Image (tube, rainbow, N blue to C red):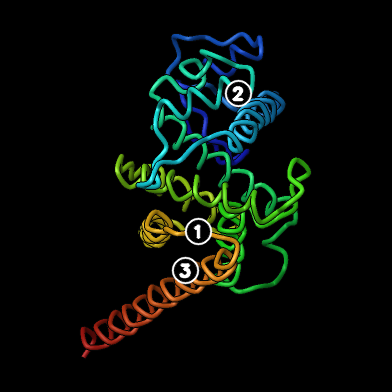
Amino acid sequence: MYSKKQNIWLEKSDIRNIIYLNTQVDNNKNIIEIDSSTSILEDNWLKSIHTIIEELIPHILIDKQNKITKNSLDLAFFKIGKNNQGNFYFPNGIRDFSDTYMKIITTFCINRKNLLKLQSNNKGVSDMIIEILEEVIDELFSLKYNNDFNDIKNYSIIKTKISSSVCKNLITYNNPLYYWKFSSEIWYTINDKSTDFNFYTKRYLLSIIWFLIIRYMSKIVNINTSNILQINNELKNYMKRKINNILYIQKLKRKFYKKFSYMKNI
């Protein structure tokens, strides 16, 4: 389920996590209604799953094909003292883990930008979109200080490898709705008020950009301390090029429609 108000994706499959928080939920409903009274519930749900994933990350082993297996995920749960709880949190195994992992990262990054009131910074639309996507990319690489690790680069390498594997899974499972939801959240965050056809075209184009970024991320290999910053910068530059290409196409389209409209009146 998608909520404009809180920037949260909450699906029926996530009810198990809410039950874990001893919260009463009507399992017969396909949708959990979101309003201001449930913002604490959403916050607790996100924090709970985010905490579990952060605990798992240092213990997840990735194979030579840069993939996370069901066995490595189960072993990670064992190492954090939650043996046999993998099926509870992620009933569909790696697919659920990958989906939830990316939802958590993107939701938290967008919420952080909301708290900073990004839309009031008097920046251009493309600049604001780039700012949000750079935030998400940095989170995928985790190029920020983490108290649980003395060496930030080691943590960043682990996180980047897992992120790359997750992106590979997203491409494999091919869930177009995820890209649409993410792009829609960005447009709401930057306070876009477009309606009618523009509402859909903007989300469609940004969905394509985010898909291309995920595909790029999924192909990253040979990550080490000497090249992680370079890879991060290359991904950001790739993202900017794609955004500029889309904007150029949009500009040509507007010129065409303007010229076509003029010719109709001749």
For image coordinates 75% across by 56% down, the residue present is: 116
Q: Position of residue 10 (x, y in %)?
A: 52, 29
Give the Cα distance between marks 2 and 1. Answer: 24 Å
Amino acid at the residue labelled 2: Lys
Give the Cα distance between marks 1 and 3. Answer: 19 Å
Q: Kindly state the secondary structure of the residue where label 2 is placed.
A: helix
Is residue 124 something one can see in this rendering? Answer: yes
Q: Which quadrant of the figure contains the C terminus?
A: bottom left
If you read the primary sequence from the N terminus, does the residue marked by circle 2 or circle 1 appear first? 2
Amino acid at the residue labelled 1: Ile
Pointer 1 residue:
223
Farthest-out residue, bottom: 266
Pointer 3 residue:
239
If you read the primary sequence from the N terminus, does the residue marked by circle 1 or circle 3 appear first? 1
Amino acid at the residue labelled 3: Met
For image coordinates 73% across by 45% down, the residue present is: 149
Pointer 2 residue:
79
Corner quadrant of residue 181: top left
Q: Nearer the viewer, residue 93 or 26?
A: 93
